[in-house]
Image (cartoon, coloured by chain):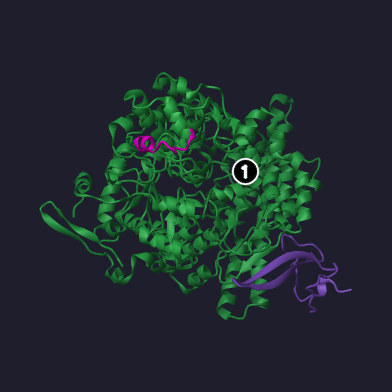
Amino acid sequence: MVQTAQPIEYKGKIVEFPLDNPAEKDIPDEELHEHLAKPSTERTRRLKARCRWKHASAGEFVEKGVRAGIERMKLITEAHKASSGRPEVIRRALGLQNILEKCTIVLQEDEFIIGYHAENPNMFPLYPELSFMAVQDFNQSDYAPQPVEESKEIVEYWKPLSLQAKASKYFNPVDLARMYNVSTMEAPSFATGYNSVVPPYETVLEDGLLLRIEMAEANITKAKAEMEKSPWDATKGLDWIHKIDNWEAMVIACKAVISWARRHARLCRIVAENFETDPKRKDELLEIADINQRIPAEPCKGLKDAFQAKWYTYLVCHAIDRYASGFAHKEDKLLWPYYKISVQEKSFQPMTHADAVEMVEMERLKISEHGAGKSRAYREIFPGSNDLFIFTIGGLNRDGSDGCNDMTDAILEATRNIRTTEPSMVFRWAPEGREKTKKLVFECIRDGLGFPSIKHDKIGTEQLKYYAQFSKNKNGATDEEAHDWANVLCMSPGLVGRRKTQKTRSEGGGSIFPAKILEIVLSNGYDWSYTDMQMGPETGYAENFETFDQLWDAFKKQYAYAMDLVIRAKDVSRHFEAECLQAPFTSAIDDGCMELGAEANALSEQPNGWHNPITTVVAANSLVAIKKLIYDEKKYTMAQLMAALKANWEGYEEMQKDFKNAPKWGNDDDYADEIIKDFYEDIIGGVMAKIINYSGGPVLPVGQAVGLYMEIGSRTGPTPDGRFGGEAADDGGISPYMGTDKKGPTAVLRSVGKVQKNQKANLLNQRLSLPLMRSKHGFDIWHAYMKTWCDLNIDHIQFNVVSTAEMKAAQREPEKHQDLIVRVAGFSARFVDIPTYGQNTIIARNEQQFGTEDFDYLKVKL
Amino acid sequence: MSTCENCSYFFPVPKDADDYEAGKGDCVTQKKDEKGQYWLSKPVVGPTEACSAFQKK
């Protein structure tokens, strides 16, 4: 049955916690989430019911019939063969043109935002030119593109031309083998092809592509005139060659995109005139045809235009030109001008606020059925998810005014109504942000979506200003532009707007695994529990470390080795991306590339280097336990600890209990927190910050776990924090280890707030009491908590508000719990799509209760 | 021999279209599966020998 929080005595009175919505009193806790979806229209209800979800669980697609298409592979390969001898950037543009001209286009019933990236709505495309290994992986699977023999031939064609073939030779084979094992570090992107991008959507919506073509053609004309100047000066004149090629490639790409959009317009007209029998839908199809004839060729004139132009830009940059994860943009800011035109002024595409909400719901469903051709390894590390689709709202505008507007609210209302796990959302929390919008943020969280995740507005803005000083062309973000940021993927802020956005994951992204590094540090760099390989330099055996400082230094050396290697791998990838994986459409819509005749992967105006330490807290808690029990109290020797670890604590149960009971992160414990703060600031961030990447700036840590806390947990042997080998690691970047934060929610904040130096971002997962959050005091408690979080200068926080009763009920009868959503790490997932191993890690997270001490600390008015 | 241009799924590309070529058309087919109805459009050349889905105009 429904549980409500018990009354408490607080400040001399009895405070009760009745449900905020009394109608919920008859809904059992075990099925609450099944009653929360409320699509705002019949159309979005139908679209959700027939959504072609592309989620994977344990690497397998959940829905029947999902598989890889072969069309894109064939067309890119055909174009590459036909364009031999042309400049590489032109070949890339011709490849995109060939795909867009000859691909099958898709129109589904009921949809208003149209366009898909494969030959069938149940399929997703593959990218042999990006990673032949990923295609090889699909060829061996049930999702293989057909005919598979043809797919195999395509793989063979691309092998010698691949990024992997080009980049590998600059690495020692021993180092490569260590990376490919994915135990202390992620495999190199030149092999995996996993990528992300932040398209400059603004230029498409504001300018339209015809103007971008005009700009590129004018630049070509000017360049040729410069080359013809007398007297000839080769030191300047030859620079134009490369630029002219880039501009020509931009023209080819933009023309291809316009033509492709107009093919969609034509399809709508054909269906309206030849197939559709419903007169209302027939009219709508003709309206869609009109939009797609104009958009994205011309500037957007209303909100419907803007949604469609955004979608096409997304498809090309993220899924057709090349694969790129993410959905990074600041949606409320981007759409606000068009909301004003259509909803407030009603001067073009007039609609109500409710219509705008429906548009957002439709976009969410469009994302939900967008398939990503990720290899099995990358499907496994996002259990229950499709791909990392994450956008940002809220924060402050350039002039410091509140960035929340009615479009922000429409986005939040739609998200709450339609209940899909994707796209995930980030809300930039600023004290100045309006309470009306924050209430909607709370409603999404209270209803268990796990998002918006919350980022500290000022920290993000200051970070972009900091990075701007390292700009290689002295054109990093201005102080005003620094306000225009969105999370690039789960956690890291990056610029959005007309230029200077991040174009490749080789700038930021990729993982390193401190828990596994600690494990090998104890064994002279040797991984005895998983790979049975030497995984780093020989830094000594734990038994010979006479002081804690020696252990600390050994960790530093192992970590520095792995960090240098992973960043070098990304930068070498970047070098070759700019040489053979150019993105001429992305270049065309970036003002910097357009002005400078530069290629999107090559040009870096705003540095944004980061890398993701995952499993940091297991390593940190282990160091605390070692220091306390071995070096300070001398209760055990290192030899005893190593024997216990090698035995996976079997026969050492009392000892394990001691190590488990050693102080843990997240309890505002000075002993633990002092060591862990130093670990974050001096090693995790300090060592990383010494590295300078492709863009000329330092690399900083973005602690976040995705599903790798499970994957790497399963590859990490027993650890001195008392954890068994193979158990999941910590689920955030700075989250306490599951179940070990026992001093309440404010103690967690006080611990986390101590880490400030050398960090870019750190993911903090918290699970809040469902009865408290659904009570009439829920918003006030949460709001006070968030103010404290902001005052403590903490970068990030996100919440699960879901009962253990409902999660256990879903484990028993998954078919009855299709709408139960949980926050895993930087993404949310349907609980029933997560493997049991992962489900249990969510259940094990401590459900924070608020006591009177917490209320006092937070200054909650009850 | 049946050709694409004689098929009821063949819709010639209009002369003012960006991708116009003489004889080129869109092959538009209606599909239905358990998730619902959708339409596919693929460029074809009119005089090409028709596929097995050919349906006379």
Query: Which residues make up the magenta segment?
Result: A646-658
Residue A59 covered by magenta stretch:
no
- According to the picture, the residue beneath numbered tag 1 turns out to be A587
The answer to whether any part of residue A221 appears in the image is no
The chain assigned the colour green in the figure is A
Residue A655 covered by magenta stretch:
yes
Question: Residue A235 falls in which quadrant of the image?
Answer: top right
Q: Residues within 10 Å of mark 1 (few under 14, many from 20)?
A: many
Give the tally of numbered discs. Answer: 1
Which color is chain B depicted in? Answer: purple
The extreme front residue here reads: A651
The extreme right residue here reads: B1
- Front-most of residues A709 and A653: A653
Residue A284, position in %: x, y? 56, 73
A668 versus A546 height, above or below: below
Q: Residue at x 43, y 42 (%)?
A: A730
